[in-house]
Structures are given as structure tokens and as C-alpha cells.
Amino acid sequence: MKIVVCIKQVPDTTEIKINPVTGTLIRDGVPSIMNPDDKGGLEMALRLKDQYGAEVTVITMGPPQADAILREAFAMGVDRAILLTDRAFAGADTLATSNALAGALRCLDYDLVIGGRQAIDGDTAQVGPEMAEHLGLPQISYVTGLEFDGNKTLTVKKETEEGYQMLSVEMPCVLTVLATANKARYMTISGIMDAFEKEVEIWTASKIDIEPEKLGLKGSPTRVKKSFTKAQKGAGETFEVDPEEGVNIIINKLKEKHII
Amino acid sequence: MEKTDYKNVYVFVEQRDGVIQSVGLELLGKARDLAAALNEKVVAILAGDQVKHHAQYLIEMGADEVICIDAPELKDYLTEQYSQAIYQMVQKFQPSILMFGATTIGRDLAPRLAARLGTGLTADCTKLEISEEGELMMTRPAFGGNLMATIMCTEHRPQMSTVRPGVMQKMERDCNRKGTITDFAPTFDSSKFKVKLLKTVKEEKGAADIQAAKILVSGGRGVGCKEGFEKLQALADVLGGMVSSSRAMVDAGVMPHDRQVGQTGKTVRPNVYFACGISGAIQHLAGMEESDFIIAINKDKYAPIFQVADLGIVGDLNKIIPMLTEKLAKKTECNC
């Protein structure tokens, strides 16, 4: 079985702070990590490899520094790593990103494509399904579990608001996985040593199978008009009133805020 | 693409097991504002198996027209079946705006469709407005909620977005509203139906997590004892929220550690945070100051909590909380 896992390097958003004076994001010193949902997907692929034998390829689109998460993936046990990097990819929204990944996948052999459900910097959950559509493959999102029959069929557990669903799908297909699906393995010491010996393949836009106008800013139907941090809160109103009056003030505020 | 060929504000109204989901009604409420700004219609998309009887209700909740797609293929939500149906509907009716709830269904269907239509999609919007040029402005949080971005899709149609449940306001039901109901029958290509639903399991989600709660009623030293927390619990129950605690009450053994908010507890960001009898030590503030709306109730008018509260009531929580609970409980009864 051949598995391709799509991963992304993201800033650790739990470490991001807002500069209280300028109201802008402080990005300096924020560590870059492998996106948690993607790591869950990678672990799922590596478990299939452990159990059934599989060739696992990781692919990421990003700047040259994204090499770091591909090395990490090598140290976790993947066989092949591809970095899609080119100025032509810059400024991509989810649709243009999904076009680039689909373009790369068309140049690869695979039975199964796995990605994270969403990345913690954008939280859109759109790239996986959009890529699946471009490739004409069935998709299952919000995946938390997987069983393989050893042949062609996957039985997949999908998380929903009320509980879960069990679905079956024949490969090839695309799954988008939650970080909570499993506990990702650590890198091994020898894996880390070897990871830096291995070759990360660099693919540019001309190497993949996609029309150039579908990439980057040009291929992006959406534009960020403006971005801003939430207004810093000042102290609100405080009332010194009798309890009944206080209760009425609270109820009116809750109504105003559409809470009740 | 001619932009002028695309008109009206369409809402995909989600149903599960034939039950209309609240987020769909919230979107109809928002769609009314957008349609008014554009001088266009609100159209509800109602898809499922034998769901047409809900159409009139959607009109009463804000739709001017309901496009009813009734087919056995659409009994349960499956990506490809729904994508084919909605794709064909979009081709025929040409919406200007197309909205979905940001649920496990909407967030699976909308990107699949956006790619098939070759248009833009903005996820998890918390604010939707119409610009002076008549374009949709979609605002959403990013970077874990640290940043807000306003996104537009000016050169492609439809302008698509998913919207978080609980953000938009439903319209009051108006039984006198009139609208049209249009049937639409898609042609399914079943050779593309590769995913099969084996079973759907509903389960009680395990020990509830205060980080997931939309409303938290949090108590501190001023609440004092277990009985005090029972009063907070009663308030949380009528609001559909949960009870959390400051460190003092956890250290005193009154509340378990998994309910603790603050530096050594959990960081929470509910829609409403009631700080009851909590003075507001910096370690506590670190865990809750990002809450959307903070209501502080405290006897001490100099308590630091009032500096971060959006609404502060100086008073005795033992009187205020039960009175508030009682009034809210009455309100809920009337709505039934």
C-alpha cells in the first residue's frame, strides 16, 4: 500500500500573544510545529505501515524552512518527503493550496491520501475536501479511527456533534484526521540522526500537474480585505444597585447579547 | 461568469434524522439582513428524504422561497450525494451568496462544493455584512482566535461561507409570512457513491469540559461552600452552561480540579463568564479574560474583577443568583 500524508508547518498558536500597545500579533519567538491534526494523520499512516507494510510519503507546501517538519516526519518513520516550494505558490487561499497539492498528488502513486482535519493557524478544514474533489476521490473528514481489511476497504470512524458514524470506503480515497485519533509516536534517536542524512525532494510549480493560473494569489478566489486583533477590553459598567435591579440589568444584557 | 446572473441569499438548512438544525434557522435570520441590504430574496435549501413538510416552517423563520430537494439518496448526509444535489441546484438557480452551518456536515459539504464550483469559501464566519459595492464581507477568527480577518470573494460566484452555530440570531417565528416552495429533482450519478454509512451512534460525550462550555458560572471564595455552588449550578442549568471555580475553592476541596479556571487550571473563553464572588487575582484573570462577555458579581466594589468585567454588579450573590435563576427559568417556560 502507498500512502501520502499532507502536512503543514504552523506557528504554535497557543504561544501567540498580542502586543497590548500596538494590538498586533507577536510572532517573534513563536515556535513552528507540525500541525497537530496532521500529526494524527501521519501517525495513522505509520500504524498502517507497522501493521500491513506500506510506503509512506509526506508532502508539504511552504517556505524552505518547512523542511524541519519533513525531517521530523523522517524521524518518525516515513519513507519519502516532498517539499512543494515556489514563489508561484505564495498567497494561496485554500482553493489554490488544494490545487497545488492535487497537482503534486497527480505525479505520485497512492492508494490512500491522509491529511489533518484543519490547521491551527487557519482552522478552515477546507483544503482536504477541496483536494479530494480535484482528484475525484471520495472523502471522509473528522476521522478518529480506521480499520483496514487487508485488501481495498477501509472502515472509518467519523466524529460528529452527537457521537460518531461508522463508514466504509474503498481506496483510493482521502481522509482528514483529528489529532485526538491517536497519540503520535516520538521521534527515535536513530531516526533523528538519520533524518538529516535523508533527501527531502524539492518540487517547484513546474514539476507538478496543474495549470499555473490555478496557483498562488492568482488562483485564489478569496482575498483578505483586512485583519485586526480583537479590540482590547476596557473596564465595563459597574452598578451598585439593589439585587432585583441588578438581576434586571443582567437579564437585559443577556438579551442584548442574544444569549437568551 | 457574469456576476449579475447570480442573485439572492441561499441558506443550506441542515436537517438530521428529519429534524431541522438550529444553525440553519440562525442563518435564515442573518440572511434576512443581507437580503434586505441587497434588496434580494432569502432562499432556503431543504434537502433530505421526505422533508418537504418543513418548508412552510422555514418560510415562517425567514425564507422567501424554499427549494425542496426530496430524494431517498439524501436520507442521511453523505458527501457525494449531497454535493451532486446542491451542485446541480446552484447551476440552475445561480445564488449570489450561499451559506452553511460550520458543523461536521457544513464543513464537509461546503469545501467539496466550492472546489466543484471553482469558487471561494470562507470558514467559520462570526460576522457577515454587505459592502457599499454590494459584496459580501466575511469576518472570521484565525490564529486560535488571536486575529480576526475580513475576507471577500469579489470575482467569483457564489460567495460561500460557513458560519459558526450560536453566533447569528434566529428570527421570531412569524406564522403569517408567505413564500413559495419550489421542488428540485437532481439527477444522481450513483457510480460516484463510494462511501457507505454503516451506522450512526449517538453517545453522551464523556465528562463535560469547561473549555467547551459556551456559558460558565464560576464561583470563588465569596460562594464559600458546596451549597453555594448548588445555587450556581441551578443558574448554569437554566442557561445551558457549566459551573467552574477559582483556585481557592479547589484548594478548599469544594470543587474538583478539572473545574478550575486560571493559571494553574484551565484557560476558558466562553460567550459569557459569570464571576461570582471571585476577587479577580491576576492568576485567575489569565484564565478567563478572553471570554466574550464577563459579568462580575461581588460584594466588594474595589475587587479587581470589576476592572475586566463588561458588566459588574456590586451586591450579594446569595440574593442575586437565585433571583436571576428564577426569572430566567420563567422566561424559558413562556417560550415553550
Image (cartoon, coloured by chain):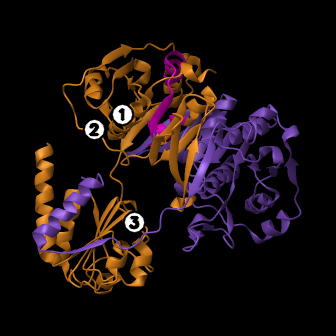
Chain colours: A purple, B orange
Pick the residue in front: A212 or A119.
A212
Of A102 and B327, which appears nearest the observer? Answer: B327
Regarding residue B98, the answer to whether it shows in the image is: yes
Point 35% across, 21% down: residue? B65
Q: Residue at x 41, y 27 (%)?
A: B39
Q: Secondary structure at mark 1?
A: helix
The answer to whether marks 1 and 2 mark residues whose Cβ atoms lie closer than 8 Å is yes
Crowding at label 1, few (<14), some or many (≥20) Cα neighbours within 10 Å? many
**Amino acid at circle 3:** Ser
State the residue position of label 1.
B32
Which of the two discs, 1 and 2, labels the residue nearer the N terminus?
A: 1
Q: Name the residue type under label 1.
A: Arg
- Closest to the camera, between mark 3 and mark 2, is 2
- The label nearer to you, 3 versus 1, is 1
- Magenta segment: B86-110
Q: What residue did someone put label 3 on?
A: B291
Which amino acid, mark 2? Met
The picture places residue B142, in percent across and down from the top left corner, at: 56, 55
Up-down relation of residue B300 to residue A224 (above or below): below
Residue that mark 2 sits on: B171
Residue lying furthest front? B132
